[in-house]
Image (cartoon, rainbow, N blue to C red):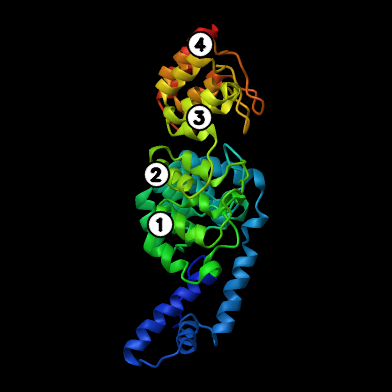
Amino acid sequence: MAQALPPRPNLEWLRKTAKQALRAERQKRPDAKLAAAQLLVAREFGFASWRALKAHVDALQKSSSPDTLDDTLVAQFLRDVRSGDLAAVRATLAASPNIVNGHGPHPHWGGRPQPLHMAIEGGHREVFDLLLAQGANVHGDNASYSHWTPLMLTISNDQGAMRVELLARGARLGLVEALMLADDAAVERLLNRGKAGLPDYAPNDGSVLAFARTTFAIDRLLALGVDTEAQDQWQTTPIEAMSRLGAKGQPLVRHLLARGLRAKPQEYARLDDRTALEKLIAADPQLLHNGDILMGAVDFGHRDLAEWLLAQGADPNARSSIGSHQTPLHSAAWEGNLAIAKLLVNAGADVHARDEEHHGTPAEWARYSMQVAENPNCRLVAEYLEKVAGT
């Protein structure tokens, strides 16, 4: 009697099953071919040929395509996944199984991720496991989420156990993932074909160089002529992206500087390099009017550097040149940094200032960050700012 197909078979599963069958068959017949193993799998499930089985599975996928889902339903599902509401996630999956690979608007910022992306970002292992059990695509369909794969998110969000699980389930380790993991051996293996080993695109629509995490990888990519100045969708260059890594980015930025790339003053601020800033500001005092420099110090919690910049005449109400054009106080509120928030307020920062995109005050940013980042320190900042503002 033929076996029944799983509830939601897909072509990736079919190919994996056939390869497993081939390995088993080669233990009996070393010269066994893939076509013979495919035929065995097809007959096991009651089909006369591999082509017939493949056509049947393909038709099932098309008939249950997540593209036909209501966007409002997917949006709510993504919010439930991101927040870790396991009961709500179970109920929605039971009613609409194909939503497991749907796309919808991100609960907090741009792009159209899938549920697996949100489970990883939220750090909810039970939801993550449930989605995988229900057929979530471990590779992800990532074009509408700036080409960020689930595997990349496990690296970026430091979800090691989830990363191990995805790899165990066959998630592809591409060049960007290898770069982010600082896996020089994998980088070398993937680039052994030279430029042909480079991806056709880079996540965030910038340069793949921005994802290098070792000096070896930097040199390997530079040798292949990758773009060193390309700005991504947030106008961020590779050297700026590395400066945003904090302490981990310092040796990478230094290496790029040694290779002839130039850093902006705000990149030195992110690295807490007061010596470099002192030289730059001495040569050009107008740099103190560049709000991105103070923002760089605040973004990364460099209180002493921020205090020094304010003492030199930096404007506590300066605006970021990118993103929401927020003030440094907005940034301190988002990060939950009470010490820097107090420093800025004492220097004259406006607690009533609103960013230009969301029109939120610093206190409102702190309250929102409590939901997104689940940072308890943001509550302290919000309460302090609300007290100062008299609200």
Please state if 318 lies on the left or on the right of 177 as rendered: right
Q: Who comes first in sequence, dot 3 or dot 1? A: 1
Residue type at the position of mark 4:
Ala
SS for callout 4: loop
Farthest residue to the top: give it: 390
Q: Which mark is residue 296?
A: 3
Farthest residue to the front: give it: 283
- In the displayed structure, 276 sits above or below 140; it is above
Within-10-Å neighbours for mark 4: few <14, some 14–19, many 20+? some
Question: What residue sits right under mark 4 in the picture?
Answer: 347
How far apart, in angstroms, are the residues tagged by discs 2 and 4? 33 Å
Residue 51: x and y, percent?
58, 83
Question: What residue sits right under mark 2 in the picture?
Answer: 251
Question: What residue sits right under mark 1 in the picture?
Answer: 216
- In the displayed structure, 47 sits above or below 260; it is below
Please tell me which residue lies in front, 380 or 188.
Answer: 188
